[in-house]
Image (tube, rainbow, N blue to C red):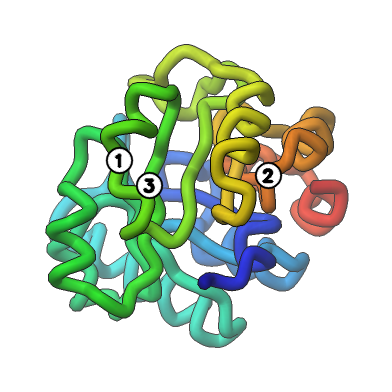
Amino acid sequence: MMNKQLLRKYFIMGSQNCSKDPVRILEEALEAGITAFQFREKGIGSLQGKEKVELGKKLREVCKRYQTPFILNDDIELADILEVDGLHVGQDDQPVEKIRKAYPDLMIGLSISNQEELQRSPIHLVDYIGAGPIFPTTTKTDAKKAVGVKWIQTLRNQYPHLPIVGIGGIQIDNANSVMEAGADGVAVISAITEATDIKVSVEKL
């Protein structure tokens, strides 16, 4: 069973989310107390190929220094190159069964948005669930319709012990409602990347 505390302040970022150096943003976020980091280099303006790998390596080194889990979003082929601690996938990405077979010791997270997805997901093979999008989000252009905190309550009722992190549109002013609904943590992007003071933002989350 994974340590649920790792999900408490879960930061997701790629260079496309940053207006300044992503390495510096991650350092500030780790210094401020984030508990896990997911490298998600995806979407408009994201790096490709060698540049993506180079950034991934730099961010990986920063996480090592702070002894914080480095999770990779979907890019299974980079898992070995970046020596990741975990992989996070969505419903349309690589199947969890395949990932678990290839990487029996990695932390695996799966995004689940509704009951139908829940029923067809191999819950027994994942370490945690990314539940959402809880609120409308502007960070992901392909995001699904917001499901609200009720979705976390539903998941918690069905799986009392399953580690759950709420994701999607979470900011300082609504993070508390996600925790109160039964999540073990909150996953954020812009609440940190667009913060005027990262330390203050992370503390308030």
Q: Give the percent coordinates (x, y) of residue 13.
A: 48, 49
Q: Are marks 1 and 3 in contact (CB under 8 Å)?
A: yes
Query: In whole angstroms, how far apart are the C-alphas of marks 1 and 3?
Result: 9 Å
Q: Is residue 65 visible?
A: yes
Q: Give the percent coordinates (x, y) of residue 77.
A: 13, 63
The correct choice, above or below, for 87 with respect to 114 in the image is below
Query: In whole angstroms, how far apart are the C-alphas of marks 1 and 2?
Result: 19 Å
Q: Are marks 3 and 2 in contact (CB under 8 Å)?
A: no
**Side of 41 where 101 appears, left or right:** left
Three-letter amino acid code at disc 2?
A: Ala
Q: Report crowding for label 2: few under 14, some 14 to 19, many 20 or more residues within 10 A (C-alpha).
A: many
Q: Give the percent coordinates (x, y) of residue 133.
A: 52, 26
Q: According to the image, label 1 marks what residue? A: 121
The correct choice, above or below, for 92 with respect to 163 in the image is above
**Side of 196 where 204 appears, left or right:** right
Secondary structure beneath dot 2 equals: loop
Q: Are marks 1 and 2 in contact (CB under 8 Å)?
A: no
Q: Give the percent coordinates (x, y) of residue 132.
A: 52, 30
Q: Nearer the viewer, residue 181 or 70?
A: 181
Q: Nearer the viewer, residue 124 or 25?
A: 124
Q: Residue sitting at 57 percent across and 76 percent down?
A: 68
Three-letter amino acid code at disc 1?
A: Ser
Q: According to the image, label 2 marks what residue? A: 183
Three-letter amino acid code at disc 3?
A: Leu
Question: Which mark is first along the chain, 3 or 1?
Answer: 3
**Side of 21 where 107 appears, left or right:** left
Q: According to the image, label 3 marks what residue? A: 110
Question: Which mark is first along the chain, 2 or 3?
Answer: 3
